[in-house]
Every structure is written in C-alpha cells, then in structure tokens.
Image (cartoon, rainbow, N blue to C red):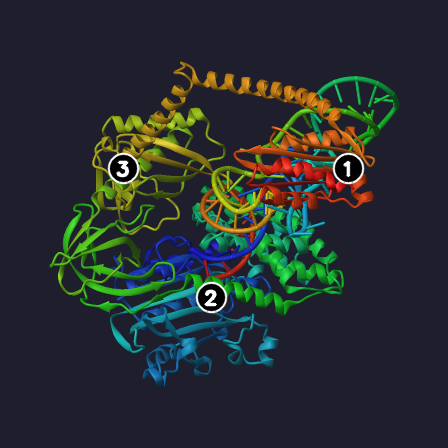
Amino acid sequence: MKSQLVRQQFLDFFASKKHAIVPSSPMVLKNDPTLMFTNAGMVPFKEYFLGQKTAVDKRVADTQKCLRVSGKHNDLEEVGKDTYHHTMFEMLGNWSFGDYFKKEAIDWAWELLVEVYKIDKDCLYVSVFEGAEDDSLEYDQEAYDLWKKYVPEDRIINGNKKDNFWEMGAQGPCGPCSEIHVDIRSAEEKAKVSGRSLVNNDHPQVVEIWNLVFMEFNRKADGSLEKLPAKHVDTGMGFERLCMVLQNKQSNYDTDVFTPLIREIEAITNSEYGNNEETDIAIRVIADHVRAVAFAIADGQLPSNTGAGYVIRRILRRAIRYGFTFLNTKEPFIYKLATTLSQQMGDYFPELKIQKQLVTNVIKEEENSFLRTLDQGLVLLDGIIKNTEGTEVSGKKAFELFDTFGFPIDLTALILSEKGMTLDEDEFKKELEKQKTRSRAAAVVETDDWVILQDDGEKEFIGYDTLEANVNITQYRKISSKKEGDLYQLVFNMTPFYPEGGGQVGDKGYLEEQDGNVIYIVDTKKENNLIIHFAKSLPRDPTQIFKVAVDEKQRFRTACNHTATHLLHQALREILGTHVEQKGSAVHSKYLRFDFSHFAKLTVDELRAIEDFVNARIASKIVLEEYRNIPIKTALDKGAMALFGEKYGDTVRAIQFGKSVELCGGIHVQNTGDIWHFKIVSEGAIAAGVRRIEAITNDATKDFFLENTQIFSEVTEVLKNTKNPVKAIIDLQEENASLKKQVEALQKDKAKNLTGDLINQVETINGIHYLAVKLDLDQNSIKDLAFDLGNKIENLFLLVGTETDGKAFLSCYIAKNLVEAKHLDAGKVVRELGKLIEGGGGGQAYFATAGGKKPEGIEQALIKGKEYLK
RNA sequence: GGGGAUGUAGCUCAGUUGGCUAGAGCGCUUGGCUGGCAGCCAAGAGGUCGUCGGUUCGAGCCCGAUCUUCUCCA
C-alpha cells in the first residue's frame, strides 16, 4: 500500500466517524516561547486542552508534520544510525474535545488497524496504565476491559507512569494512555523470543505505532491532580512506521516515503544503499534531514544563527557533513533533492511545490557556505597538526576550531585518526560545557507561579475599537532575568493592548491605579492565546479596577507602517511579479521591514516604481474595509492571499484597502491618506532568493526629507550655491587629485633642493659624515629626508630637530654600517637627548624619534649630538 | 540573548613583545623576449590598514565605542 494511500485511508476512516479533517499546521511555531517546533500532533490543539479556546469541531483528525531534534531517541546526533527515528515525521491523529472518550477511541483504533489496514491482529500488543500510588491513580480497568474484547490477555501489558501516563509538561492537562505496539519479526524469531518481552525495549521490529491518550486530569503547580471539567482524547500514530508495517518492510527507510529520495541520492553521489554501514548511515541522514529542512523552509523558517533558524542550519549542516565525509561530495547536491521531495509529497503538502524554488536556492546557498567553512577548517586543522608536538591534539585547539570556525568536531577526530593522531576529548567536552554554562547563565529567566485572581475563561481583545478601558487583573506572575531584572506579567479580563504578532510589535502604554499612581506597560505579548502585559512593578492592590491606556502616538505610527506594509506587498507583486511572497515582516512604530522572495537586486527604477505605487494609493485616500470573524473561505474568495507558515483559526480577520486584501490581525489606519507618505530607506539580500526592504512612513518621512534637504542645502552652500552640485563635486575631486600630484612633485623638488643644501652642510668627524640641523618639516617628511640622505651619503649620522604646535621633536638616523661598526644606537641617542626637550622616545638602532614639551632644548640637543662621534 | 573570531592592494592573504620607509602571490598597465597549455623577463600603477575616538615621541598592532562578515552555545 502506497504511503499516499495510507494517509488518505486514515483521514477517510475518521471522516466517516464524523471527524472534521483539517490540514497540517505549520511545523515552525511563531507564538509559543516555550516551543520552537511542532513536536507532536497535539501541539496545534494545545489551547483547546488548556481551556483557553473552545473548539468549533469536537472531533478532528489530521496528519501533522512534526520536528524533533532532542529527546531520548531524537537526539540529532543519533538520527540515521538506526532505521526508525527521524527529525521530521508525520503524526496521524484523531481528537475528541470533550466528546467521545475511551470506548470509541479504542474501538476505532482497532477497527482501522485490523479491518481497514488489515494488520494481522496476532502481531499487535497493547498497553494500559497500571496506576500510581504517589498520585493515587488506579489501574486503568476501563481500558483493559475495552481491549479485552479484541486482544487476548497475554498481549495486554501493564505500563508504569513513565510509559503510560501522558503529561503535557510540568503543569497542565494529563491522563493515562494506551499504546499499540506491533511485532513485525519473522515467525522464526517470534518463536524464539516472545514479542511481549520486547515491547518498549527499543527493538527495531517491535515498535509502538499508536498512542491513545485519555486526558482527564489537570496537573496543578503544587503537583496535585484535579479532574478536568471535560474529558478529551488525543492520539498520535507514527506515519512512517505505519507505512513500514503495511509495506512489509524492516526499516522506515525502505518504505516509499524514503526510497525515492534514497534512489536520487544514490544517483547524484554515485553511491549504493545497502552495502556499507557508513554509506547507509550517510544516506539515511541526508534523506531524513532534507525533509526536515525543506519543510521548515517552506514554512518560512530560513537557516540562521539564532533560535529555530539555527536548529535548521544544524540539521542541514549535519547532512552536508555526512555527504562530505562518507559520500565524498565536495559540491552542493542536497538542494537537488527538493524536486524529488516536492514530487513525492507536494500533493498533500502543497507548500512544498509552491516554495520549491526558494527551498532549492536556500539549501544550495547554505551548502556552498558550509563547504567554504569546511575548506577553511581543513587548512586551519593542518596548521594545528603541524604545531602539535606528539600525537595528541589539545582539546582547546579543537574547540576553537569548532567554536570559532564551525569545523565539526567529528571531522577533526576523523582526520586526526587517519594521521595516527588523537584528540583530547575530555578537554574538548570541558570547554563545550563551559560555553553552555555561560550561555545558560546569560539567558536564565526565573518564572514564578501564576497568581490567579479570577477565573475568567476567554480573554477579550478590544483594541481594534478602543485604546482605553477599565479592567481587572485576572492573573499575574513575576519573572526575573539577568538582563532586564524583575518584570511582572499581567493578564486582564479584557484589553485594548495589541500583543506582538503578525510582525507587528506589542503595544506600550500605562495602567492607572485608583489613587492616580501610574504603572507603565513596557510590552505586550501573546502566549498560548493569553495576552500578557509586561510591567516593571505590580499595583499595590492588584484586585482593584484599573484604567489602562495604550500609547496613542506609538499605536498610530505603527498602524501607518502596518498598512504601508500591505500596500508594499501589493506593489511588489504588481511590479516584480507574483513570485514575490512575504517571508517575514516587522512592523515597528519607527519603521517597517519586509522580507520577500525575489531573485535579483532591485533596480533604482523598480524601487522608484514601488514607492510611486504605494504613494499613489496613499494619495487616493482609500478607506479601510475590515472584516472580523469571517470564514476563511469567504476571505480567500475576496482575493486574500493565504500565507503558508501561518496558522489560521476557522474564522479570520481580513483587511482590505482597495485591491489589497490580506488575512491580518494587526492594527491599521482608517484611511490610507493617514500614512501621509511612504519612503524606502534600504534594500538588500538576507538569504539566497530573499530580499529585505526597510521603509518609513508619516512623521519619519518628514524627518527624513528635512534632514536630507538640510544636508543638501549645506552642501550647495559650501559649493557656493552651484546649480549642479554633483558636477561641482566631481570637478573638485578631479582638481584635488591633480593638485595632489603637483604638490607631490613640488615636494620632491623641494626635498631635492633641501637635500642639496644639507649635503653641503655635512661635516666629517672621525670618518663619520655628521649633520645636526633644525628644520621646519613634519615627522613623515623628516623620515623620508633622512632615508634619502642616507642613500646618498655614506656613514651618515643625522640629527634633525623640529618644532610643531609648541612641541619639540628629535629624529636621529645612523647608517646601518655605523650602527654595527661603532656600536651606535639611534634609540639611545634620542632617549638621552630627549631629556633636553623634556620628553622621551625610541625606535630602531638606525632610526629613532623622540618628542618633548620644551622646544628651547632643541638647539642644545643638536650641539650635544656631536659627542656621540667621539 | 551570551561567547569567540574577522575586516590590510581588484582577489587570496602575511605582517610574532608598538618602531624593518606597509609586504607576498595572483590579477592589471606598459615595454621587451617567446610556436605551447598558469609562457618568460623588466618596469609600473594600485592602500582613509572597516569607521570614530583614546593612549604614545611613534599605532595595521594596545584601549574604548560602533559597523560588516563568519561561527559556536542557549
């Protein structure tokens, strides 16, 4: 059974059980500070379980793209070594939000596996929760009785809290779960060792395929459990493993989820899968990682050096490294796999098809840059090896190579071992540990428990209509970080404050206590659908009613920039073409930033056309049309662009200005005329195929133009109010260059004359040509003169004094042969004579300088110089 | 968010405790030689040593700030 069919049958099955089938949410998360990626099927539905949002459909099923790079089996460095763990994987799931519970979940799971997928029921094992005394939890008899209808008792296994009690985190919804395992070993092996003993034992052919979680408790901050008001079902089935079972394979990588990629890798790298363990691992690593990276980029997460982007970069680089070392690839090649991947999965995940070009470009660029890093590292490592005495390379050196130059440590180890050398790994680990501690210490944020004052289900955002309100604090907590010190997070029953999101910054403002005391709100953010206000202090009595107000000026400027962003987006698509897609956006009060896909630097004409386009729409004073809570389909029919990488609820808000229609939760001006003016201030590349425009609007453009005209008028004034300042400056530059040459020539002349004069003044004492003279020249000219004279006159001992700005300077030149023959030292000379001008100095034996505060001493020093000749 | 590195001629880079009149290779210009695959020889042009400030008689080098690029960690 083809993998596409496996997926479809799952969805069809649950559709027939009255489930709403929803598309996969993005793999990359944007509004959850506790999590960078969707790492399980339930993540998109988190807020339903937390009770922060009410589900529209009570039964839902989907397949969810997930990414895991840490955890017991998903440590990035381990993926690829076995045949059944992945970074990116799909999780099939069916959900009940306060609807059906254990019975239906178990019945349907069995029906699907045995009757639809036709898995031999004798291969299946199930586990049930055995209870836990510390939480006063009893044996899950209900699940056991339900399973007993289908499964003989000797294949029902009791599991402990670790395996069979699922918790979302330290706090929050939780409950017992029941796992379904499948044993796909041969009959022969089954006869030797019972499958039962291998369940939950990391056996590659006795694997868990489905976990059914029965959520009925809430774990409170103090560790105690309470019953949830509604019971939920959350299930997750590993798609790749399911395919392995249904296609009678022994490895996930032998299913058609991976084989097209593997065939392509074999073809490109001229290698063969299945003959050599090292090659196989490398191929598996690449096949796995390219999926993770391609999906992440399609979701809008580009590789970078921070946060989620860094995780993506690490995954991609690991793939490059395995290719480099074991498949001998010295040129980019992974980017070519994007085509295979989009052909294979693009039907169900259209973002792969639509973003194929971007994915290709980004991966290729990243491969090129990392191959450069590897090249550079190889050279540096060579240097380290040459400078190492003995056969052990210090861990510190290796760490520097890794930390500063990004050269992978396992490559270092490999190369060393090829040369019969070793690496001080303990020292390396110590250095790495030190760095981790340092980073952690800097990022540490201590979070206190929430103090709940009121339990008020849904918190309302009223900021579209008003900037002020009287509110209660429903909950608050303190957070401490090293950088910002103590801050308080406040949640109101309703709020006019816009939380950071959709690229727009959070509102600032204040909260006023009844006695008039004002507390400033410094930022507003969203966390799991909760709008959190950051304040430097806590009101004296948090239970009062407060007046809160948003900073109007900042809000207005931000709104101008946000609306301008929409118009800019429209302009780019209109002028550059529809391949332009938003890749990121930051809307601040002072400026806006817009990242988009495009493959060339924008020309001056294009930039001008874009500005004109936006300003024309500002000039025609287009009125805002806002649609709140309309079904997503209605919005798309109006012409709104559905952006991949954004997760939308069932109803959306659409913002329309003339022909610009976007799904957007942000704040906009009522009329484009409010923006006043739009000006692009910079354009550049941020990644392969992605460009960034920064622009300003409203007041900021006024300042921009005022400042520029000011500079311009100053320039023309300096240029005597010329009509053509550009030409004037070019003329000046040319004139300057020719004058410089003339001056140079003249100086040479002058120096020649001077040299002639000076030669005549040279005395000969004891065979040494001696000259001590006071000149009116700068330090550099004296130096030039000294060497010039030195070339012309043998055995020269030259002492020059000069005075500038009330300071005295002495320079001494002694021909090199004299230095050796007579043990003279110009440095010593100037140091000693320097005393006469109240200064000090030094230099080389044949040329040295000294400076001092007493110009009157120069004459005396020049006379005294003669003494060195005796 | 924290750390490390980096910026010197068009390109790739050297420049060890502050002082060798800022260098090398490639490239470029000019002239000469030459039946050869990176031709040879000679001469030459090309530098705000990232930027701003400081210390010093003297800074590419030391100190402070800032920007660029790379990199590791969270």
Q: Which mark is residue A727?
A: none
Q: Which mark is residue A815?
A: 1
Eye-nearest disc, 1 or 2: 1
* Circle 2 residue: A118
x, y percent for residue A771: 73, 32
The amino acid type of the residue labelled 3 equals Cys
- Which residue is at the far top? A723
Could you tell me how far apart the alpha carbons at marks 1 and 3 are, in whole angstroms?
73 Å
- Which residue is at the far left? A515
Count numbered badges in the picture. 3
Residue A59 image-quadrant placement: bottom left
Mark 3 packing: few (<14 Cα in 10 Å), some, or many (20+)?
Answer: many
Eye-nearest disc, 3 or 2: 3
Task: From the viewer's perspective, tell me whether residue A468 is left or right of residue A760.
Answer: left
Could you tell me how far apart the alpha carbons at marks 3 and 2 are, in whole angstroms?
59 Å
Could you tell me how far apart the alpha carbons at marks 1 and 2 are, in whole angstroms?
99 Å
